[in-house]
Amino acid sequence: MKTETTTPTGEFVQRLSSTRRGARLARLLAVQQLRDWGLADTDAAELVVAELAANAVTHGRVPGRDFEVRLALAEGHLRVEVSDTRAEREPEPVRVPDGHGYGLLLVSALSTAWGVKARCVGKTVWATVFVR
């Protein structure tokens, strides 16, 4: 008898308030979704979501506007997208952190690729993370 193993696939999208509480909820919801997909090793993905969500509410916040988290799982890779409404503030990793600013260095270290893409309103910061 041959047993096939399948890689889970799926998409998760959630809009959240552009607050520290919203950023924390983004991480918690992402962790729950990854567990629902049956993934075991999700530490890197969890940290990437946490950092991108924290950046969205810290640097991309526009009062009265939400941010959005999108997770897309396919073939062992998770694409994390966090969109905010502030297009003019594109993220850049700092060369020499001065007590803060380590977030994008962490995202860069934990992901296979990351970048920024423009939207009609705002921007989306994305990262691709290997998951099992």
Image (spheres, rainbow, N blue to C red):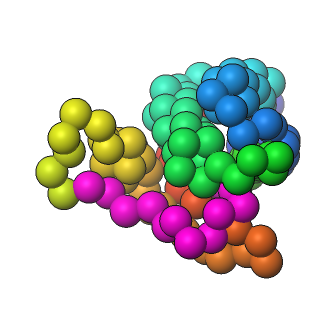
The C terminus is located in which quarter?
top right
Left or right for 130, reference 69: left
Please say whether residue 118 is one of the residues in the magenta stretch: no
Q: Which residue is drawn at 49% across and 67% down?
A: 90
Residue 74 visible within the image? no
Task: Locate residue 23, reporting x and y percent.
Answer: 65, 32
Q: Residue at x 62, y 42 (%)?
A: 57
Task: Locate residue 21, reporting x and y percent.
Answer: 69, 23
How many numbered circles does the render carry? Answer: 0
Q: Which of 4 and 56 is in front in this view?
A: 56
Task: Locate residue 73, reporting x and y percent.
Answer: 71, 48
Q: Which residue is drawn at 20% across and 45% down?
A: 97
Question: Magenta segment, which residues?
Answer: 76-94
Q: Nearer the viewer, residue 126 or 103?
A: 103
Q: Which of 48 and 99 is in front in this view?
A: 99
Q: Which residue lies furthest to the front in this view?
A: 63
Please say whether residue 82 is one of the residues in the magenta stretch: yes
Q: Write down the quadrant of residue 1 in the picture.
A: top right
Q: Residue furthest left?
A: 96
Task: Locate residue 89, reporting x and y percent.
Answer: 52, 65
Image height of 11 relative to 43, above or below: below
